[in-house]
């Protein structure tokens, strides 16, 4: 499995987790909590995807010898966009702050589980010694 496969699995499992948590938040606490979970989870997933793309790009630039600080420095832009999105989400009153926190907290367990599944060794297809 490649890093792109892992990223895709994390995005899929993360979206499913955020959707389930958002539905539960709507049922338990109403629309602002559900909007917070969906918004926080969406921002966390977008941030993760963007980070995966930028790190892959930065590694490629460094390996090719074209990676200067100006070219690799785009990774910092991700932080400004993420924090700005979270600030707008909470400051405008569209979502409950606790819901946003729950949405943000949905990504680490998903990433942990998918990383464990990714690290499992695949079973050999043939028995050693058979030719």
Image (cartoon, rainbow, N blue to C red):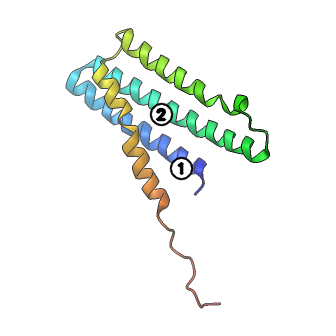
Q: Which mark is residue 45?
A: 2
The residue located at (72%, 31%) in the rendering is 71
Quarter that holds the C terminus: bottom right
Residue most toward the left?
28
Q: Quadrant of residue 23?
A: top left
Which residue carries the number 1 mark?
6
Q: Residue furthest top?
A: 92
Looking at the image, which residue sits at the far right?
Answer: 65
- Give the residue drawn at x 44%, y 13%: 88
Q: Is residue 57 above or below residue 77?
A: below
Residue found 57% across the figure and 86% down from its top: 128
Near mark 1 (Cα within 10 A), the count class, few <14, some 14-19 or many ≥20, is some
Q: Pinpoint residue 54: horizontal percent, then vertical percent.
A: 63, 36
Most foreground residue, 10 or 83: 83
Disc 2/disc 1 C-alpha distance (Å): 13 Å
Mark 2 vs 1, N-terminal side: 1
Taking 8 as reference, is 78 above or below it?
A: above
């Amino acid at each position: 499995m490649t890093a792109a496969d892992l990223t895709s699995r994390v995005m899929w499992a993360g979206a499913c987790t955020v959707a389930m948590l958002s539905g539960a938040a709507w049922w338990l606490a109403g629309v602002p909590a559900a909007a917070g979970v969906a918004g926080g989870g969406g921002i966390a997933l977008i941030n993760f995807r963007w980070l995966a793309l930028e790190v892959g790009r930065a590694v490629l630039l460094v390996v090719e010898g074209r990676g200067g600080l100006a070219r690799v420095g785009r990774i910092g832009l991700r932080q400004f966009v993420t924090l700005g999105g979270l600030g707008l989400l909470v400051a405008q009153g569209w979502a409950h702050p606790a819901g946003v926190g729950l949405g943000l907290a949905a990504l680490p367990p998903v990433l942990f589980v998918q990383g464990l599944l990714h690290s499992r060794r695949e079973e050999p297809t043939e028995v050693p010694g058979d030719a």
